[in-house]
Amino acid sequence: MRFSRKLQKLLSRDLFASALEHLSRATHPVNTRRILDDIDWLQFRNLRHKYPHRPGSPQINRFEDIAYWIEINIERAQDLWLDRSPPLRIVDLGCGAGYFLYVCKCFGHHVLGFDTDNEPLFRATTEILDVPRVIGRIERQTPLPDLHQTFDLVTAHRICFHRIGRVRDGVEWSPADWEFFINDIRTRFLTENGRLLLDFNPRPDRSSFFTPELRKFFLSQGARIFRSKALLGKNPNERPRFKQ
């Protein structure tokens, strides 16, 4: 009975916060068409011939889904109040095709991507969208390469760099590995009021990434947890806000 009450409270908090997100977006509409009109659609159509569908190719960011993913990333940016904040320096870890940073750039922010160079399609899309990026890989217990600047916001969406081996093996970073990573970001890449936004995929069984152990750990680091997201500030003793 106690567990069900706690679950109800948790769900009600998430539902309330989700309703506030929707209300905030509705009261600050974004002209999606203007953002889409700035895209060079001819270059994207040419990618269809250069990078045809193939087994194992990333379907999530295929060029046919540009409008859908631009809308998704507008929502991501709005939830961080990036459509209403002064220009920020933003780096997106695992930037993929670069859609999130493209949206941020349209809102007037200074952007940088960080990712591997394993997927030629992503290289092509970031070039078309004029999203600068640094090539590198995130490894456990290893500092990130020097990016030669600090950032007001560090983001990572649909995170998979914490997986060790194949997804079905279920082996992933320990809290100690996460502590190393978070401390590296805090001490080397965040400005004094900087934020780190980590957005996780659900687990293969569709359950939350935040197991009881991981939820306890992230909360001990001062994280604000909402659904699949953990938002952390430079100071672990201060819980940051999604609003800048």
Image (tube, rainbow, N blue to C red):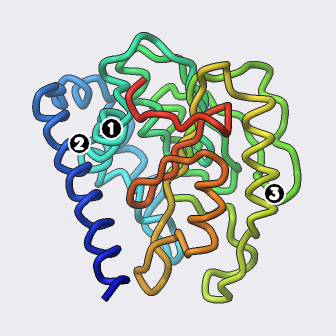
| Residue nearer the viewer, 88 or 211 | 211
- Count of numbered marks: 3
Alpha-carbon span between mark 1 and mark 3: 28 Å
**Left or right position of 49 against 194:** left
Alpha-carbon span between mark 2 and mark 1: 6 Å
Answer with mark 3 or mark 2, whichever residue precedes in sequence. 2
Q: Quadrant of the C terminus?
A: top left
Which residue is labeled 1 in the image?
79
Which one is in front in this view, the residue at disc 1 or the one at disc 3? Answer: 1
Residue type at tag 1: Asp
Q: Position of residue 131 (x, y in %)?
A: 53, 28
Q: Tell me where residue 150 sits by quadrant.
A: top right
Of all residues, the one furthest to the front in this rendering is 2
Kind of element beneath mark 1: helix
Q: Tell me where residue 160 sits by quadrant.
A: bottom right
Checking the image for residue 225, the label placed there is none
Residue type at tag 2: Glu
Which residue is labeled 3 in the image?
139
